[in-house]
Amino acid sequence: MLYKGIKTREISFPLGGIGSGSIGLAGNGRLIDWEIFNRPAKNTANYMSHFAVKAEIDGKVVDARILQGDLQPPYTGEAGGTNFNGFGWGPNRSNLCGLPHFRNLEFKGEFPVAEISFTDELFPGTAKLGVWSPFVPGNEDDSSAPAACFEVELENTTDKTIDYTVVGVIANPGNQPTAHNKFTDDSGSARLFFSNGCEHDAFDYCDFTLSTPAGQDLSYQEYWYRGGWCDDLEVYWDDLNKPGKFTNRSYEDRSEGMKQDSGLLAIHFSLAPKEKQKAVFVLTWNVPNRHNDWKEDIEELAKKNGLENRWKNWYATRWNDSSDTASYLIDNYSRLRGDTFKFHDALFASSLPEVVLDAISANLAVLRSPTCLRVEDGTFYGWEGSGIDKGSCEGSCTHVWNYAQALPFLFPALERSMREANYKYNIDENGGSHFRINLPLGIKTQVHFWRPCVDGLCGDVMKTYRDWKISGDTDWLKQLWSSLKKTIEYIWSEQNYDHWDPGKTGVITGRQHHTLDMEMFGPSGWLNGHYLGALKAVAEMAAAMGESEFAEECRMTYAKGREWTDNNLFNGEYYYQKVDLKDKAQLNKFVRENDDPAERYWSEEHGELKYQIGEGCNIDMHLPQWYASLYGIGEIMDSEKIDKTLESIYHNNFRSMRDVANTWRNYALNDESGVMICTWPEGTIKPVIPVPYASEMMHGFEWAFACHLLMKGKYSEGMSVVKGIRDRYDGEKRNPWNEIECGSNYARSMASYALLNAFSGFEFDLTRGMIGFTPQYTDDKPFKCFWSLGSAWGEYSSENGRQEITLCHGYIELKELRLSGTMNSISTGFGALEFTRFENGCFFSSPLKMSVDGHNMLAIE
């Protein structure tokens, strides 16, 4: 996507690794949102960190300027600043908007890479700033490196030889007396190392390294000039505008309270007319030590479990410090760049509509944000989103992460680590699966912790099924099986104080916590559908575990529940919640010590239950079938009724917000369109105080809905929802790489990744060695798309009766293909393959081992 002018105002493109925090590249080239200090920090800067360029002809400086474009309004100053440096004093000088910069720019962002093109009539040449961080599906460790790579390309567009200088400036994050900067140069790289000087085991210890490959013509300053007022910037600008190289400056000590010390690396080269060259900088960081600083009773909980409230970021167990990380990045630069761009190129070569590729790729940025952590043993942990200075809603919240589909397909080992942690630590003594896990990892959940919720518990079962099918690893499933089985038995258990389904009827009728943060008190197509999906999935998993009796029990319970659901929870237009809003007595059986649900859920004035859906048309009534279809579980609710439900949700809930009375959070405004959480069509009864968030538009819910529409052949409706969402994130109104919902970088937005599966009809089951494709909406035109199972990924294409499956990375063993169209012959570059045809697919006579260095392409005709 290309952004210009005012459309760059809200851009912050994240650079960093999975669980390592990130730094944002602003739409004008500034370095903002320094969220690398183990906490969110939107709208922050690291003093005057930046890049700059200089041009000299015949030993005279003809131009020097900051590698940035215009700062977008407002220009009055930042709200909440300090006196003399806030609102009413103009923009903060540290953003360097007062120094010469480039008049014109274009920002091209295609996650995981971005590029800004700069021009100015006074600068002799053109400049491009390309940025990336390692992001390679299936390679979660390199993709977790705390690193940002910057490539400044200058082209001499004049008819004279020009001597260019490219400068990288970074500020030391510490301002205590122990902070220090140090330049080193060895055979691999030149590095400027910054440490805040704290003790290495302190929670606020950090170090940075700015590095560049060795062997170049370099100069450096370990320190900018120290002085009062604006002395440091005055002297830097004077140094930059002198011909030739920088002269190093160093100081032995510093005093408390002094401004942050900046240092710089400069790369020098000459270009003849029409020549161009890149200067490469790698910025790495190390903030190794973490602890739970958001939960009041965490010290007591940790102590009870024999734990200390501290751990290291995973990356700190692989690299000793930022200098070590820098050496690794420089030594492996070509490979890491090549693999990252290979992923980018394969994804963006897809023939899907541009807005769909934008939606798929942009929300992958969540994985680089402070929403995501990797703890010391490598386990992945996620907040729901990122708050102001802490995560928003802790604990890898099960019913939120249900929606997110990027991690399991791109980095399945990390997704499996979430299942492992959940079933090891988050199951109480009764078998209840609670929906938030505690850090430090190892705190065993208790009954009184966050209560189990239907969509979270059942969603985890379906996700385990998905992750088993993606990996094909039945031994992995065996490790989780006993805990997973207990969670299904909990649904039926007398120890389940919410009385979900004690009679094994296949219908949940008790008190049901869910992702809209309240409880429902009557069965619904939405939550009961989650139960049905879990039952059908667990029946297949039980059979694989050799537990045929339990498998049959789950199948029978599923069959009863499905029949009752289809007969009783569909009103002719959509699935709904069956509840008597006037019956207060139904709350009595859920009364426990210090927990009377009537205090929260009964409105005495209105004589009615609060926070229910009832006859409402809820955006998620289709959701469990979406999961089941996406994961290969199959049909769990009547197909025609699901079709009608999707149509009704679109008809009733998709609208402009212009005349909607939204009493909740405003994620869509004015003429922006989207899908409301819940509406009550004419002729239905709306509760006086309905389900929370009913009038909101939340992107994760909308992505799942849009994707399901497309999977069911409803193209115009699905694309209307897709376009409505991404129109809100156009660079002017909101940041394209930060979809918000209860905070920034919200995990649920990664539901958009499944649009790939919707358009390609991607199927997978590596327990059988099967993948398949049934492209949608091709109109007999050439079709191409990216696919991934993490350990193997590549491209699928279809044109003029010929289909190709190309492996770009990894290894996969195939026994079965499922494809539409003719299959008269199948060949690799090594010759034809023998196979047995069946409707829409084939079995190979012997397993086909595909690898990048071997059979890396299949041609089907």
Image: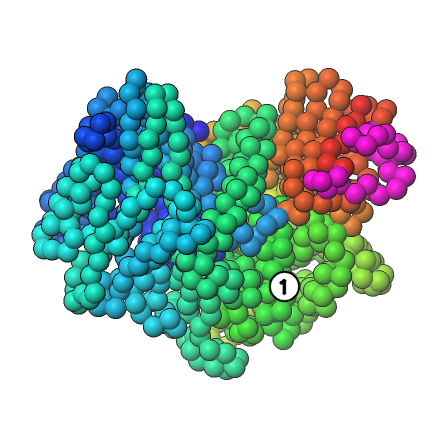
> What quarter of the picture does the C terminus occupy?
top right
Residue positioned most to the front: 58
Q: Is 211 part of what is drawn in magenta?
A: no
In terms of depth relative to the viewer, which is nearer, 370 or 487? 370
261 w.r.t. 69: above or below: below
Q: Residue at x 56, y 66 (%)?
A: 377
Spot occupied by residue 91 in the image (x, y as percentages of width and height) = 17, 42
847 w.r.t. 436: above or below: above
Q: Is 827 part of what is drawn in magenta?
A: yes
What is the quadrant of residue 781 in the picture?
Answer: top right
User: Horizontal placement of 721 versus 234: left or right?
Assistant: right
What segment carries the magenta color?
826-854
Q: Residue at x 57, y 36 (%)?
A: 342
User: Horizontal placement of 391 versus 527: left or right?
Assistant: left
663 w.r.t. 683: above or below: below
- Mark 1 surroundings within 10 Å by alpha-carbon count, few (fewer than 14), some (14 through 19), many (20 or more): some
Amino acid on which the number 1 mark rests in the picture:
Glu
Across the whole image, how many numbered discs are drawn on residues?
1
> What quarter of the picture does the N terminus occupy?
top left
The reply to whether residue 712 is in sight is no
Secondary structure under tag 1 reads helix
User: Horizontal placement of 235 versus 50: left or right?
Assistant: left
The reply to whether residue 25 is in sight is yes
Magenta stretch, main secondary structure, is: strand
Spot occupied by residue 93 in the image (x, y as percentages of width and height) = 17, 45
Spot occupied by residue 484 in the image (x, y as percentages of width and height) = 69, 64
743 w.r.t. 53: above or below: below
Q: Residue at x 65, y 70 (%)?
A: 431
In terms of depth relative to the viewer, which is nearer, 815 or 447? 815
Residue to which mark 1 is pinned: 420
Spot occupied by residue 511 in the image (x, y as percentages of width and height) = 57, 62
